[in-house]
Amino acid sequence: MMRESTYFTGRFIFRYRWLVYLAVFVPMVFIRWHQTNHWLTWLIGGLLILTGAIIRLYAAFYIGWKGTPDDPLKRKLTTSGPYRFTRNPLYWGNIVGFAGAAVIFKLFWYVPISAGVIFLLHHLLIVWYEEHRMREKYTDEYQEYCKQVPRWGPRLFPTIPLVSGIRQPFPLSRVLLAELGTIAGFIGTLIIAVLKEFYSFFLIFLPSIL
């Protein structure tokens, strides 16, 4: 019963995970409504957000997009690229990106909270559900993959050869389409942070000018 309820909970959260992401992100915007950032905050936060986006895009080049059953680019079990080091590079991109968002909003104490909530969400529910599906689909092949590559890792010295696994020729346009929501989220974060910076600047300095 426990496993069945965990499965259905994981499936539900997997489908509506954007609501959890939103719940973690919204407090960043409103906890400190007035903020003026140091250039170092912008640099570190921006680099973390960019790193998160790059990790996701890099992983998407290998895992692609599921597509339809008759699609020649239909996703198969991928064990190459970043999937040689960890079974969940896409979610690592989320964790790093959310940490960068907390930094860029100058909420350093919120960094472990935002990254921790996203990690626990994936670790306890979503990944459990996804791995259950993968075991049903790929059976022994996926079991062997799990033995060689850690769920999170990253494994610095992978045992899977560089040329192993399926490297699907997913075109850039399709990868960008698959990651459109994530890219829009990262860009939106930067835009909101810039708007807050301008708002705080005028709120602080405009009265003295007038």
Image: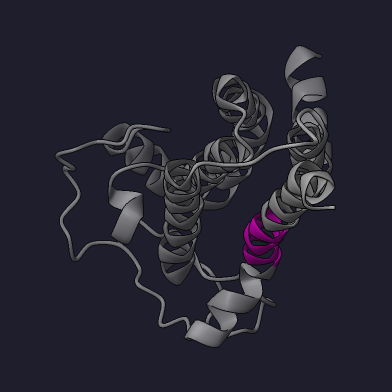
* Residue 182 within the segment the image draws in magenta: yes
Depth check: give the residue in front, 138 or 122: 122
Report the residue that reaches farthest toward the top: 2
Depth check: give the residue in front, 27 or 93: 27
Above or below, 7 against 68 in this view is above
Depth check: give the residue in front, 148 or 207: 207
On the image, which quarter does residue 102 sit in? Answer: top right
At x 67%, y 70%, the residue is: 180
**Bounds of the magenta span?**
181-191
Residue 43, percent from left and from top: 43, 50
Residue 151, percent from left and from top: 42, 33
Residue 176, percent from left and from top: 58, 76
At x 75%, y 57%, the residue is: 195
On the image, which quarter does residue 8 sit in? Answer: top right
Q: Is residue 118 visible?
A: yes
Above or below, 54 against 129 in this view is below
Q: Is residue 154 left or right of residue 129?
A: left
Q: Is residue 169 left or right of residue 2?
A: left
At x 57%, y 29%, the residue is: 115
Q: How many marks?
A: 0
Quadrant occupied by the N terminus: top right
Above or below, 204 against 117 in this view is below
Q: Is residue 66 visible?
A: no
How are the residues colored? one colour
* Residue 99 within the segment the image draws in magenta: no
Specify the principal SS of the magenta part: helix
At x 58%, y 82%, the residue is: 174
Residue 182, percent from left and from top: 65, 60
Q: Is residue 81 left or right of residue 184?
A: left
Q: Is residue 66 left or right of residue 54?
A: right
